[in-house]
Amino acid sequence: MSFNANASEWKPSVAAASWSPGGAVASPVPAPSAVQESNDSIDESDPLWKVVLKIAGGDKEKATNMINNPDSLLQYPEVAEVLEAGDAVAMDTDDDWENKNAEQDEALAQEVETKMQIEEETPSVAVVKKVEEKEVVEQILTEGDPREHLNLVFIGHVDAGKSTLSGNILYITENVDKRTIEKYEREAKELNRESWFLAFIMDTNEEERAKGKTVEVGRATFNTDVKRYTILDAPGHKNYVPNMIMGASQADVGVLVISARKGEFETGFDRGGQTREHAMLAKTLGVSYLVVVINKMDDPTVQWDKKRFDECVTKIRPFLKGCGYVIKKEVKFIPISGLSGANIKDEVDKKDCPWWSKCVAAGDNNTNIPTLIGLLDSLVIKGRDPIAPLRIPVLDRYVDRGTIAMGKVESGVLRPGMKITMAPTRNKYKIDTVWVNEEPVSSARPGENVLIKLGGGCGTEDVLKGYVICSDPPCRSVSKVICQIALMDMPENTRIFTAGFQAMFHSHTCEEECTVVKLFETTNAKGVVNKIPRFAHVGMKIICMIELDRTVPVETYDDYPFLGRFTLRTEGKTIAIGKILKLPPKKED
């Protein structure tokens, strides 16, 4: 038996059970499972366990009970020494952990910085995003009808035969049935205007039919094997030029209809006739090609005479060149008969016109295709960018179980579900539905005429004619522009163009009153430049600043040509055509 010198003084326990002879000691017996669990969970290499086991005389059960009562262990000096040494070890470990954390933080910061440098130095993310966007657009372009869509605007002097030509194209391409034509023939006969029956296809208004004058822009569609077309039959009377501008603003190709009948060509082309003004407006409003059709070649006063055809072409060619047309590339000349249909879809009979096939073979008049529809099918429209930001000038709007906007997609791709910005108000809306030719579609490409149902609380007062539907970045909205104009004409009572001159500003589908604020430069026909001039006159090119009465959505001509062209009109005549050079600096939000 060994004596423990470190044993504590014996103290009687008040809670001990009373001793009785022969009686069992009433000491609580711990459950075997708990002891077994404690023994299994003890680390025998732990210094504290070794010391306590030594104090317990090697009895593991007793040592376990001692460890489970940590307050009683503090009375043993050996345990106190072990615990103090453990705290010191723990403090050393914590210092190492902090250092380790600092090292990890530094490494992590360096890794993040490296990644940021890679993203800044290599535009791979932007390139991938651009490629993905292009792939989506290419997928959209293959959806639906793959044929290209063109808007044709038929322009020219009143009574040149625009509506008759438009109606006959629809009839020849089988878009109007024979029964309807017979009905129109009877109605025209009742009005003693038997030759007007084809015009009734486009002129549906009773007033238009009674007077034989188109007032509103007629709209119809026809298809060929190669392309899809929308006909815009513009009014020819000078009182309805604003309506003509609305139609021409949507057009890709202008069809300038000229009457070859004796006296009618001269009336339309002389000063005051609408042939000149319409040709000039078509160029300003951005048509890519101008097809000049010399109509009524079967008239008794003409009878397909080549001299009359050449006379009309010779007279109009210099004027078109002065309007800015590149004659050899952008202008085509072709003789037709809108009433009989000769040279529209099928070539004119060589017995009636033996000289036309020779002109086509020789490439005269900038065409090697003998018929009008064949010529239209051969035209290639450039500048349509489906990847550019969305731009749709609003032509009109109405209510039909929601707000419906009408317009032509000039750039970008329109899809249902898109979020758009309305310029100039900067309000944001959602596209609920898109229609092309009254058929719902999943996307609309540049050149398509669309109907758009606007959601997000958009009312008819929130979208007006002349507004522009945009994706980000939105169209600029300004009240001042610096522009270059070509002065073509002046009102009778004002022959000098100076600062303070007032007119109507027409750009895409918007029109607004404007005032010329300042003249910066003029260039006369001889090329002489005058800086800071006091006035200008007809025939000069002018750089000036124009102030608009209200904010309008426009862009510079270099960025978006279809939003950067404009015309100035006053007193019923077009006086100038121009393009926007600069806009005011953007205001910081």
Image (cartoon, rainbow, N blue to C red):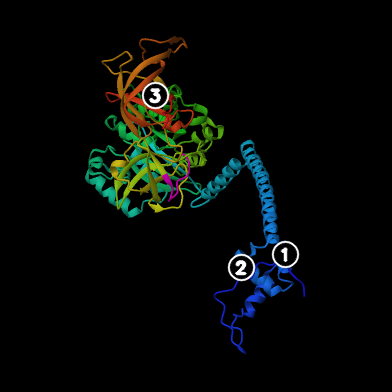
Report helix, strand or loop for mark 1. Answer: helix
Say which amino acid is labelled 1. Val
Give the answer, above or below, for where 296 lies relative to 346.
above
Report helix, strand or loop for mark 2. Answer: loop
**Span colored in magenta:** 411-419
Q: Residue furthest right?
A: 1
Horizontal side of 358 relative to 120 (left or right) equals left
Q: Position of residue 530 (x, y in %)?
A: 43, 9
Say which amino acid is labelled 3. Val
Horizontal side of 456 relative to 82 (left or right) equals left
Report helix, strand or loop for mark 3. Answer: strand
Dominant secondary-structure state across the stretch colored magenta: loop
Categorize mark 1 by other alpha carbons within 10 Å: few (<14), some (14-19), many (20+).
some
Q: Is residue 412 magenta?
A: yes
Q: Quadrant of residue 160?
A: top left
Q: Position of residue 462 (x, y in %)?
A: 31, 41
Give the answer, above or below, for where 286 lies relative to 539.
below
Q: Position of residue 508 (x, y in %)?
A: 38, 33
Q: Return the residue at label 1.
A: 51
Q: Return the residue at label 3.
A: 481
User: The C terminus lies in which quarter of the figure?
Assistant: top left
Categorize mark 3 by other alpha carbons within 10 Å: few (<14), some (14-19), many (20+).
many
Label of residue 170 in the image: none
Q: Position of residue 106 (x, y in %)?
A: 66, 42
- Which numbered disc, 3 or 2, marks the residue closer to the eye? 2
Look at 73% across and 71% down and name the residue there: 57
Say which amino acid is labelled 2. Asn
For the question of whether residue 267 can be seen, the reply is no
Q: Return the residue at label 2.
A: 69
Q: Is residue 80 magenta?
A: no
Query: What is the C-alpha distance between the residues marked 3 and 2?
Result: 90 Å
